Amino acid sequence: MQDEVTQLVLEQALNGLQFGLMLFLLAAGLTLVFGIMDCINLAHGSLYMVGAYFVAAAAQAADSFWIGLGAGVAGAALLGLLLELSLFRQLYKRDHLSQVLATFALILIANEAVRVIWGAQPVMLNPPDALAGPVELSLFGEAFFYPAYRLVIIAFGLAVAALLYLLVAKSRVGMWVRAGASNREMTQALGINVQALFTAVFVFGAALCALAGGLLGPLLAVQVGMGESVLILAFVVIIIGGIGSIRGALVGSLIVGTVDTLGRALLPTLLRALLPADAASTLGPALASILIYLLMATILFFKPQGLFPARA
Amino acid sequence: MSLRLTALATALMLAGSVHAADSLKVGLVSTLSGPGAGLGVDIRDGFTLAMKQLNGKLGGLPAEVLIADDQQNPDIAKQAADKFLKKDKVDFMTGIVFSNIMLAVGPAVFENKTFYISANAGPSQYAGEQCNPFFFNVAWQNDNLHEAVGKIVQDKGYKNVVIVTPNYPGGKDAVSGFKRYYKGKVAEEVYTKLGQLDYAAELAQIRSLKPDALFFFLPGGMGINFVKQFVASGLSRDTQLFAPGFSADEDVIKSVGNSMLGMFNSSHWAHDMENAENKRFVADFQKEYNRLPSLYASQGYDAAFLMDGAVRDVKGKVEDKAALQKALEAKRFKSVRGDFKFNSNHYPVQNYYLRAIGKDASGRVTNKTMGTIFSNHADAYVAQCKMK
C-alpha cells in the first residue's frame, strides 16, 4: 500500500513537470512579446494551434513524426515572420484595446482558416511507434510504468529551458532582450535595432508555440479551438511569474503545472474523506479546476508584479 | 441596379410570405463551427445526401433546406430557430446536436405547432413529463447507449469498473444510464472538467485502482485525448475500454488511429450493417464526402427519410397537423439501422448493438458489429409521458 501511494505521487509529480514544461514553451514566447513589446497577443494560442496542424500535416506527408515536427516548426516560424512584418509591427504603437481587438480577430480568422483547410474534425498526429507505449521507470527505489512519449516531452522542455537560459542570460542578444524588457526607450537610445529584435523575438515565440503544439499533438486532439484553452493558462503563468521574465515564466509554468495536476489528482480523494460522496464528486472537480486561479489571486495579493518582475 | 435589387428583394419577400402548399421548407439548425462542429457537420451532410437522393423533394413536393449554425450556443440557436419559424415559416425543423440547446429551442417550436425531428439530441425531459406531440427523435434517448454499455459490461462479467465522464449534466446522465444495467462494483466515478485536455492525473489515479474495465463518456476532442493517453500509459494491457458509440465512431477513430483497436462500444447503427438502405447510404456518403459516415450522419439521413415518408403519406397536406403526426408515428420509411418503431413518447424502440474496433479487409481501422445487446429496447422515461 505504501509503495502504491509513493508510486502515485511520483507519477503525478512527473505529470506535473511535463505539463508545466509544455506551458513554459507557450508562456516564454508570450511573456517576451508582452513584456518587451508591450503587446497583448491573444493570437498566441492560434500560433500553437496552427503549429500543431502544420506538424500533423507535415508528419503525414513525410510519414515521419520528427521530420514533421521540424517542418511544422519551421512553417510556423515563417508564418510568425509574415504576421510580424504585416500586422504586429503596426500594433506595437497602438493601445492595448486595439491590440486585443486585432489579435482577437486573428483568432477567429485562424480558426476559420484551419476549418476550411483541414475540416471541422480533429486530425491525426501519432507519436513515433517506438515511443507509443510505456517504459518501466525506476525512481527512488520505486519501479513503475510511465508513457515513454511523456518522458520525451519532459526532455524537450528541459532542453528548451536550458537553451533559453543560455540565450537570455549569457548571450548579447539575450542582454538586449532583457534590456528591452526593463526599459525599451533607453535600449533604443543606446543604439540597439529594436525593430529587428522585436521581429526575432516574435518569430522565436511562434516557433516555440509550434514546438509545443507539435509535441502535445500526439497526446491531445489536434482540433480547431485548441489554442484558446491553453492561452488562458499561459496568461495565468506569465502573470504569476511576472510579465517579461523568462525565469518567471519557467517558475510560473512549473507551479501551475504541478498545482493543477496534483489538485485534480488529490483533491477529489481528499474531499471524499471529509464530505459525503455525492457532495465530494460535485465539489472536487469544480474546486480542482479553479485551484490555479485561486493560486494566481493569492500570489498577486502578495506580489502584485508577479514573482519575478522584469521591470523591478 | 438599385432598382433591380429592390425588385429582387420585393420578390423574395413575397415568396417568403406566400406559403404555397406545393413546396416545403425544412429549417436545419446545427452546430457547424467550434469544437463540436464535427457532429453537426455530419448530421448536415447526412441530411443533404438524403435530399440529393430524393432529388430535392420530400414526399414528392419540392423542398428547400435552410441551414443555420448555432455555434453550440443556445441563444444563437434560439434566434436562428425563431427566424425559421416566424419569417421563413418552415414545415419541419431538425439538426440540433446538444440537449441543452434542444431544451432552449423546443418551446418556441412546439408553440408554433411545427414538427421537430431530432437527429441527435434526446433529452430525458422530452421523453418523460415534457413529451410533446410535435417532438420526434429519430436517433435514441440520451441514456440508451450508456445503458447498452452497462448491460454488456455486466454480461461479460467485469467486476471492478471505473467511470470517467465530464462534470456536467450529460455526464451524470451517462453514469445513471450505465449503472441502470451494470450492477457490479464501481471503484470510482471520475468527473473531469468539461473540455479538459490532459488526463495524466486521472490515469495515474485509475492505475492505482486497478479496474478490469473502464467506461468513459467524453464527447468530441476530450475522448480523443483520453484514449490516446490511456493507451500510451500502458493501462490498456489490464483494463478493457468501453464507451458509448459517440466516443468511438469514425470521426474519433480517424484522429486516434491504432490506439483504439480492441475497444468495445455500443450503437444503434453501424456502417457495416447488412441491409440495402444502409449499403446505399454508406457507399453514396463515401462517394460524396470521401469519408466513412458516423452515426450522426446516419441519423441526419434517417431524419430526411422520416419526413419524406410522412409527407407522402398525407399526400402533401402538411397543414393537417393531426394527420401528419399520425403519419410520422407510423414511420413510413426504411431506416439504415434496420427496423425500429416509435414509442408513445415519439422516441425509438430499437435494437442496440455491440461494436468492436478492429481492422477491416483493407487494413483500415474501423468499427465491426459483434452482436446485439438489447432487442426492441425502450427508454426509461416513457411511463412518465402523457402524450396529448
Image (cartoon, coloured by chain):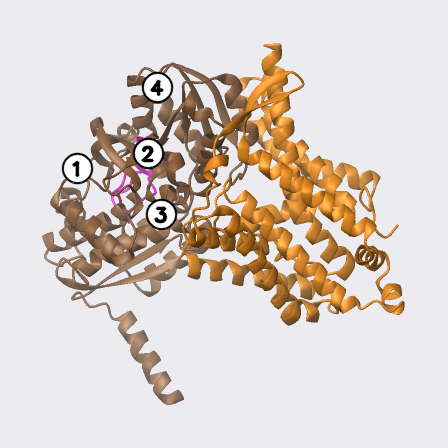
- Marks 3 and 4, how far apart in space? 32 Å
Residue type for callout 3: Gly
What secondary structure is marked by label 4?
Answer: loop
Q: Are marks 4 and 1 on the same chain?
A: yes
Residue furthest out toward the top = A1
User: Where does the magenta region start and end?
Assistant: B117-145
Instruction: Report how far apart the C-alphas of labels 4 and 2 lie in the structure.
Output: 26 Å
Q: Is residue A2 visible?
A: yes
How far apart, in angstroms, are the residues tagged by discs 2 and 1?
23 Å
For the point 45% across and 53% down, which residue is it?
A62
- Mark before the other along the chain sequence, 3 or 2: 3
Residue at label 1? B340
Is there a contact, CB below 8 Å, between mark 2 and mark 1?
Answer: no
Q: Residue A31: where, in percent of width, then height?
A: 73, 52
Which of marks 2 and 4 precedes in the sequence?
2
* Number of other residues with Cα within 10 Å of mark 4, as a class: few under 14, some 14 to 19, many 20 or more: many
Label 1: few (<14), some (14–19) or many (≥20) C-alpha neighbours in 10 Å: some
Q: Chain of mark 2?
A: B
**Numbered circle sitting on residue B182:** 4
Q: Which residue is mark 2?
A: B129
Relative to B152, residue A95 above or below:
below
Mark 3 packing: few (<14 Cα in 10 Å), some, or many (20+)? some
Cβ atoms at labels 3 and 2 below 8 Å apart:
no
Q: Which chain's colour is brown?
A: B
Same-chain check, marks 1 and 3: yes
